[in-house]
């Protein structure tokens, strides 16, 4: 009897322990599902107030009046982005990395997020790209320091820069993000660093910018400071063009690291870390929505694009100052293939690109805007 009683007591204790674990597991699962459900309820898709002026001309030119039978044509109201000439579920963001130590952005990117198809395309615009501006230094990154010389009244350089980028790509981005070097380091540290294959020995020192780069080649874990050195190093044969390629490879590793984790439940923490380290006009709940949509993607659907010597003269020079001048047709082809948010193709005359005639070397603008020929010396 004693052995049987002891066995029953032991069985009872085991059953109680199992029930306790089951209750704990169930409660935890309930809380996780509840938190996940609350998170999904909290997310807010973008509300984009797109300027009607930027809608395609075809919309305004739809036939009016009578048809062949003499009946009045009644045009339906514009009820969706696609009917207005915009691709559905496509959003664009201007991303700017500050600064290059000389009063201008070090990184200028346009991101197109197709949430319907689960893809992201990122286009880097070289900071030395020629633009048609009223001041002498005609680089795209000169907007930060000189935007107040424009006839328009901008309260922040980012809006002037967004207009300058729009001249090159054919559309105003829906949102913008600016990130300084401190924020970049903090973001990398916040995700635990990034494993990356450093392509070469990198040594550079600039006390004025508090920039000290000392990286060995090879696969390694980069913290925020080391990652900053990697993306800012530019002593390559092709200068800024190769630096952009390294930046793209690094960002591809970052996206891959985040997508491999796919931890939806820490989404709120990731968004808060991001929000604390950037300036942006994207609302917090919309940031969370973008992050959630990103974490559902496959890494092969994150693509990066920039110029090479087939798309631009990457070694152009005016009065001893280096520039990148775009070749119109290849550039427009790149935009239409990967970065076009419209349902129609962007044409060269829709853009204000300042470029050279390949035969004569004479500068002209693709949309016929007056060329401001006052180059810095």
Image: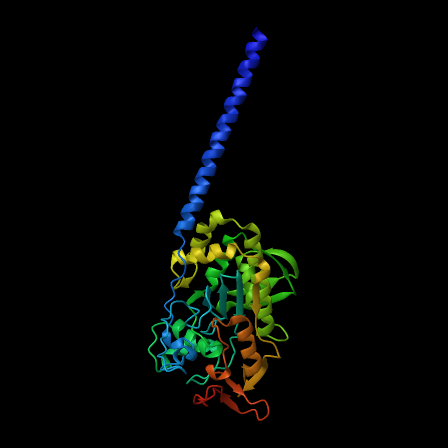
Residue 327 visible here: no
Q: Which residue in the rendered view is the most extreme toward the top?
A: 1
Q: Which residue in the rendered view is the most extreme toward the front?
A: 69
Quadrant including the N terminus: top right
| Res 297 quadrant in image | bottom right
Q: Nearer the viewer, residue 314 or 360?
A: 360
Q: Nearer the viewer, residue 68 or 303?
A: 68
Residue 198 visible here: yes
Above or below, 111 relative to 267: below
Above or below, 148 relative to 175: below
Q: Which residue in the rendered view is the most extreme toward the bottom?
A: 360
Q: Position of residue 180 (x, y in %)?
A: 45, 64
Name the residue: 43% across, 44% down: 35
Q: Position of residue 310 (x, y in %)?
A: 62, 79
Above or below, 47 relative to 74: above
* Left or right: 218 in relation to 264: right
Above or below, 286 relative to 134: above
| Res 5 quadrant in image | top right
Q: Position of residue 329 (x, y in %)?
A: 56, 82
Q: Nearer the viewer, residue 280 or 350?
A: 350
Name the residue: 46% across, 36% down: 28
């Amino acid at each position: 009897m004693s052995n049987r009683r002891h066995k029953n007591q032991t069985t009872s204790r085991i059953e109680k322990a199992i029930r306790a674990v089951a209750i704990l597991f169930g409660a935890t699962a309930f809380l996780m599902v509840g938190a996940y459900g609350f998170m999904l309820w909290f997310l807010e898709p973008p509300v984009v107030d797109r300027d009607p002026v930027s809608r395609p001309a075809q919309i305004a030119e739809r036939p009016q009046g009578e048809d062949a039978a003499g009946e009045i044509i009644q045009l339906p109201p514009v009820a969706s982005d696609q009917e207005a000439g915009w691709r559905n579920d496509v959003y664009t963001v201007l991303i700017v990395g500050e600064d290059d130590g000389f009063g201008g952005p070090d990184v200028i990117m346009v991101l197109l997020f197709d949430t319907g198809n689960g893809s992201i395309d990122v286009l880097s615009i070289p900071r030395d790209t020629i633009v048609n501006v009223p001041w002498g230094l005609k680089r795209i990154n000169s907007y930060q320091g000189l935007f107040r010389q424009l006839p328009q009244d901008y309260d922040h350089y980012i809006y002037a820069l967004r207009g300058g980028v729009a001249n090159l790509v054919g559309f105003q981005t829906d949102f913008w993000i600016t990130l300084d070097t401190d924020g970049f380091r903090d973001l990398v540290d916040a995700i635990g660093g990034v494993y990356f294959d450093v392509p070469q020995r990198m040594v550079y020192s600039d006390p004025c910018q508090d920039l000290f780069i000392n990286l060995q080649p090879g696969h390694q874990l980069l913290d925020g400071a080391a990652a900053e050195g990697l993306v800012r190093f530019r002593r390559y044969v092709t200068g800024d063009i190769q630096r952009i390629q390294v930046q793209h490879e690094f960002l591809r590793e970052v996206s891959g690291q985040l997508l491999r984790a796919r931890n939806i439940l820490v989404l709120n923490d990731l968004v808060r870390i991001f929000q604390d380290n950037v300036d942006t006009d994207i609302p917090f709940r919309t940031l969370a929505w973008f992050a959630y949509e990103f974490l559902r993607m496959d890494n092969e659907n994150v693509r990066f694009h920039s110029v090479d010597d087939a798309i631009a003269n990457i070694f152009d020079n005016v009065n001893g100052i280096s520039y990148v001048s775009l070749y119109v047709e290849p550039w427009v082809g790149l935009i239409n293939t990967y970065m076009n948010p419209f349902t129609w193709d962007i044409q060269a005359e829709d853009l204000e690109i300042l470029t050279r005639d390949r035969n004569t070397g004479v500068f002209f603008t693709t949309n016929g805007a007056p060329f401001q020929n006052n180059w810095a010396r």
